[in-house]
Image (cartoon, grey):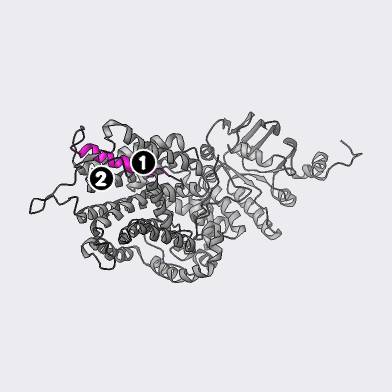
């Protein structure tokens, strides 16, 4: 890829190429892809240390309390599930973390630094990336270009550099294409790299969103209902992908409705109800927690507390 | 969208041959594409000299001058396409920048002006710098607005510029400036090469400038800047969440669009030789927008064709008197019914090294799926 000569076109592209690889070539290829996806592996450094802290966050919209002094932490290298019944404030919590809303009180800290009044794109640069519940891709751009926008977040070329095609511009152009290609392979949609995002099938669009978010080299990847609308087989593949992302050195926050998926993939779960945190623990504990069961299934009228 | 589905069979039939040509064209290596474009460029240069019988606008309108006006409008459309087509910022006051550019050329070259005289060619970059500055002045407070709201503010800006040209005494209102400068050089008989009556040298100058500007705009498109613009156009919030400093890049789009608008204004003033406060009404902004939408917002080749049509048709049908606008209007309506996305749909190449990457990933050098209309409304408000 680093040579300037054009690679001769392969019928069927990378997918066909991979299909013809020997086992050893395949392993090498996958290692190369994983390396390009996560060039800066922080996982070995401080696993288990708190990466992001939501500290006593309250958010009011007029009289409505959307979040009521919510506190929880996300540790490096874990997959944290954020669950709750409809309208519990999961996505709102997401939006506070990623700077869409500013908390009425309390704060969000990334590696000990308060996010404060930073712009959204600055928060992305600090290392927080997200996907959207209702897919929000750049429809008229190709899959590859969508991912490249994410990679661009770490780059600096602006108008003057691009006008005169500075050496940095060329270096960055080479980099973005390499990394974005690897990311498309990583999430398994490289065969449609040249298609416009809006022409991709639904499952591909979801994966493309994940690839685009990963492209910004986040310390914490936030997935907002990534399995919405998936069938069981697709959900299983998605669980596989989320684990692969974690194993590649990323920390993941997952909002999801599907209990089997959440229980199956997360290391720890935080439960919200009516904007309050009602539980925080291992999946097995959460499953047994009476408050959580009550929140999801309701309490009988003569019921227990 | 409804118009699109209704005309689906027609469109598919039309597009199949276009697409076949496009596929063939895209599969050619870069140098061959350049060689392929060369004869077209030569033909474009020779247009006013050839004065082809079916195409000519004479005897009613001088053909080289008509072609020059078309070229200036093409330049305007290229600039407006950066703002509207790529960054998706609806600008209804673009004529304001055009006017500022024209006044810069007039103020620094006309004998009626008190300012220091500069050579005409020096006023071209100067006009770009000055309009860029005005683009920043307009953009900084207003680019927080989106969609229709931005359109209204820019509309106001266009009007302010027009009214200031009337009010400020130094700008001489309807009296205007005559004897605006031109590039140096005289013919054998002592007449200047770039005279008011001879459009051909002006046309060559304009086409050369267009080619240079196209190269620069292309460089921007195939870079982080172009990608940021298109991402903002597609979904501003999502773009911001993906690390695009949206405000900065919107401001850049505005400034670059303004600079190109100013350059076209200065070019126009030079050939015209006279400049007053007329010709800067809001109808011109709408006409420019027309050129961009008609050709295909977000497609450089498209907007150039659109601008040519918008400028050329009224000249070509000049013999119909005031009914030439009827022809123009009917042509516009028919076009918008059958091609709501413009003559050529939005299309951009956003990667300097896209060919290599696509070849490796999918075995073909380009994105070949069919184009379609941009969704025109993105919903206003913050």
Above or below, B107 relative to B350: above
Within 10 angstroms of label 1, few (less than 14), some, or many (20 or more) residues?
many
* Image location (x, y in percent) of residue A94: 63, 40
* Image location (x, y in percent) of residue B374: 50, 55
* Image location (x, y in percent) of residue B147: 50, 44
Left or right relative to A256: residue A174: left
Above or below, A109 relative to B311: above
Q: Does the rendering let one see residue B259? A: no
In this figure, which residue is indicated by the disc labeled 1?
A: B96
* Image location (x, y in percent) of residue B181: 19, 43
In this figure, which residue is indicated by the disc labeled 2?
A: B269
Q: Does the rendering let one see residue B119? A: yes
Mark 1 on the same chain as mark 2: yes
Residue range highlighted in magenta:
B91-113
Taking the spot 25% from the left edge, 45% from the top edge, the residue there is: B269
Q: Is residue B110 magenta?
A: yes
Residue B162 occupies quadrant: top left
Instruction: Name the disc covering residue B48, or none.
Output: none
Q: Chain of mark 1?
A: B
Left or right relative to A260: residue B375: left
Taking the spot 64% from the left edge, 29% from the top edge, the residue there is: A104
Q: Farthest residue toward the top?
A: A105
């Amino acid at each position: 890829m680093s040579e300037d000569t054009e690679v001769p076109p392969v019928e069927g592209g990378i997918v066909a190429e991979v299909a013809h690889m020997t086992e050893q070539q395949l392993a090498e290829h996958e290692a190369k892809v994983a390396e390009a996806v996560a060039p800066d592996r922080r996982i070995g450094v401080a696993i288990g240390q708190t990466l992001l802290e939501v500290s006593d966050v309250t958010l009011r919209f007029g009289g409505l309390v959307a979040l009521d002094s919510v506190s929880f932490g996300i540790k490096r290298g874990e997959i944290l599930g954020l669950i709750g019944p409809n309208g519990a404030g999961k996505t709102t919590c997401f939006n506070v973390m990623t700077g869409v809303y500013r908390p009425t009180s309390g704060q969000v800290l990334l590696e000990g630094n308060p996010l404060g009044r930073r712009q959204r794109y600055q928060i992305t640069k600090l290392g927080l990336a997200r996907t959207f519940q209702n897919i929000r891709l750049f429809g008229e751009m190709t899959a590859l270009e969508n991912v490249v926008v994410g990679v661009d977040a770490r780059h600096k070329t602006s108008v003057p550099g691009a006008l005169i095609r500075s050496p940095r511009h060329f270096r960055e152009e080479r980099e973005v294409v390499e990394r974005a290609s690897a990311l498309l392979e990583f999430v398994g949609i490289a065969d449609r790299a040249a298609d416009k995002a809006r022409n991709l099938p639904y499952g591909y669009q979801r994966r493309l969103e994940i690839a685009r978010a990963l492209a910004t080299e986040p310390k914490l990847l936030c997935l907002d209902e990534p399995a919405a609308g998936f069938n069981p087989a697709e959900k299983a593949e998605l669980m596989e992908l989320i684990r692969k992302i974690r194993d590649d050195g990323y920390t993941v926050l997952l909002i999801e409705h599907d209990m089997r998926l959440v229980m199956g993939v997360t290391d720890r779960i935080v439960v919200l109800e009516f904007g309050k945190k009602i539980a925080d623990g291992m999946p097995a504990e959460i499953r047994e927690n009476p408050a959580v069961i009550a929140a999801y299934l309701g309490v009988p009228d003569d019921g227990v507390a | 969208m409804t118009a699109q589905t209704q005309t689906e069979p027609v469109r598919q039939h039309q597009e199949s041959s276009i697409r076949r040509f496009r596929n063939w064209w895209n599969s050619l290596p870069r140098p061959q594409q350049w060689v392929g474009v060369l004869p077209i460029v030569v033909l474009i240069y020779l247009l006013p000299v050839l004065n082809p019988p079916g195409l000519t606008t004479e005897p009613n309108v001088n053909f080289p001058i008509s072609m020059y006006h078309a070229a200036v409008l093409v330049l305007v459309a290229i600039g407006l396409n950066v703002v509207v087509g790529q960054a998706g910022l609806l600008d209804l006051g673009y004529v304001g920048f055009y006017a500022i550019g024209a006044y810069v050329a007039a103020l620094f070259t006309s004998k009626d002006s008190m300012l220091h005289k500069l050579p005409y060619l020096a006023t071209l970059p100067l006009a770009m710098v000055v309009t860029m500055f005005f683009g920043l002045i307009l953009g900084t407070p207003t680019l927080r607005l989106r969609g229709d709201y931005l359109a209204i503010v820019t509309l106001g800006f266009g009007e302010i510029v027009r009214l200031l040209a009337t009010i400020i005494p130094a700008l001489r209102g309807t009296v205007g400036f005559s004897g605006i400068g031109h590039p140096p050089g005289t013919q054998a008989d002592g007449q200047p090469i770039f005279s008011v009556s001879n459009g051909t040298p002006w046309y060559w100058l304009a086409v050369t400038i267009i080619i240079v500007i196209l190269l620069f705009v292309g460089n921007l498109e195939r870079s982080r800047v172009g990608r940021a613009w298109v991402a903002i156009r597609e979904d501003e919030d999502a773009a911001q969440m993906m690390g695009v400093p949206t405000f900065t890049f919107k401001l850049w789009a505005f400034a670059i669009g303004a600079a190109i608008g100013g350059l076209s204004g200065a070019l126009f003033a030079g050939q015209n030789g006279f400049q007053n406060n007329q010709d800067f009404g809001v109808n011109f902004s709408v006409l420019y927008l027309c050129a961009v939408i008609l050709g295909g917002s977000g497609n450089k080749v498209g907007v150039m064709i659109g601008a040519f049509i918008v400028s050329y048709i009224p000249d070509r049908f000049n013999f119909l008197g005031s009914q030439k606008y009827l022809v123009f209007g009917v042509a516009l309506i028919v076009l918008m019914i059958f091609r709501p996305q413009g003559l050529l749909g939005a299309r951009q190449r956003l990667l300097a090294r896209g060919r290599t990457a696509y070849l490796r990933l999918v075995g073909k050098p380009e994105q070949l799926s069919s184009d379609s209309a941009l969704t025109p409304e993105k919903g206003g408000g913050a």
